[in-house]
Image (cartoon, grey):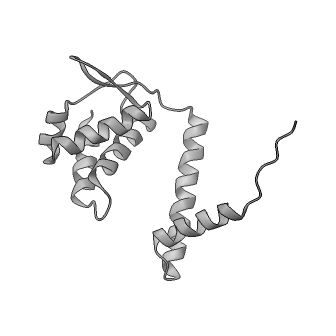
């Protein structure tokens, strides 16, 4: 794991707000993989090493690693460690995901300027999604 990613993790954990640390940690590692900062096959720090480096509970790190393992981002090799098993997406997909993230941020910022919370935006999207007609299958 690079020093810059570790530094970002420290800053993010210090300013976590209401977001669970486990989620924040798994999100940042995922972003490091997607950004190419953590390459496929890279060995992540042990649970204990990362917990000490971030001054957090080993349980928090273990749960983050378990989330990433369920998503197929990392694989745990008993006796060897935790390794990135997912290659970064192609550049076009990376651009698409960044654009979607920018769009989401803009929507939340605009909603906040109208007095809504990010949770209100999520609920509105869920409500909108619930009103869409089911896609038809072609027999």
Number of marks in picture? 0
Residue 107 as seen in the image, left or right of residue 135: left
Residue at 38%, 27% in the rendered image: 39
Residue 96, image x and y in percent?
60, 45
Residue 55, image x and y in percent?
13, 48
Q: Residue furthest bottom?
A: 115
Residue 4 as seen in the image, left or right of residue 85: left
Quadrant of the image occupied by residue 46: top left
Q: Please, is residue 111 above or below residue 8 in the view?
A: below
Residue 128, image x and y in percent?
66, 66
Q: Please, is residue 84 above or below residue 60 in the view?
A: above
Residue at 53%, 75% in the rendered image: 111
Residue 129 as seen in the image, left or right of residue 4: right
Quadrant of the image occupied by residue 35: top left
Residue 137, image x and y in percent?
82, 42
Say which of 123 and 48 sits in front: 123
Residue at 29%, 48% in the rendered image: 22
Say which of 85 and 110 sits in front: 85
Q: Residue furthest right?
A: 139
Say which of 59 and 115 sits in front: 59
Q: Is residue 36 visible?
A: no
The quadrant the N terminus occupies is top left
Q: Is residue 62 visible?
A: yes
The quadrant the C terminus occupies is top right
Residue 107 as seen in the image, left or right of residue 7: right
Quadrant of the image occupied by residue 86: top left
Residue at 32%, 59% in the rendered image: 19
Q: Residue furthest front?
A: 139
């Amino acid at each position: 794991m690079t020093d810059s990613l570790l530094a970002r993790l420290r800053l993010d954990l210090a300013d976590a707000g209401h977001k669970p640390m486990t989620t924040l940690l798994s999100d940042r590692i995922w972003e490091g993989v997607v950004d190419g900062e953590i390459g496929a096959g890279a060995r992540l720090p042990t649970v204990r090493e990362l917990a000490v480096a971030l001054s957090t509970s080993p349980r928090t790190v273990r749960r983050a690693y378990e989330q990433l393992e369920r998503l197929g981002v990392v694989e745990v090799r008993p006796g060897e460690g935790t390794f990135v098993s997912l290659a970064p997406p192609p550049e076009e997909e990376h651009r698409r995901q960044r654009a979607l993230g920018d769009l989401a941020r803009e929507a939340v910022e605009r909603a906040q300027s109208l007095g809504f919370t990010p949770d209100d935006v999520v609920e509105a999207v869920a409500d909108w999604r619930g009103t869409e007609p089911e896609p038809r299958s072609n027999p």
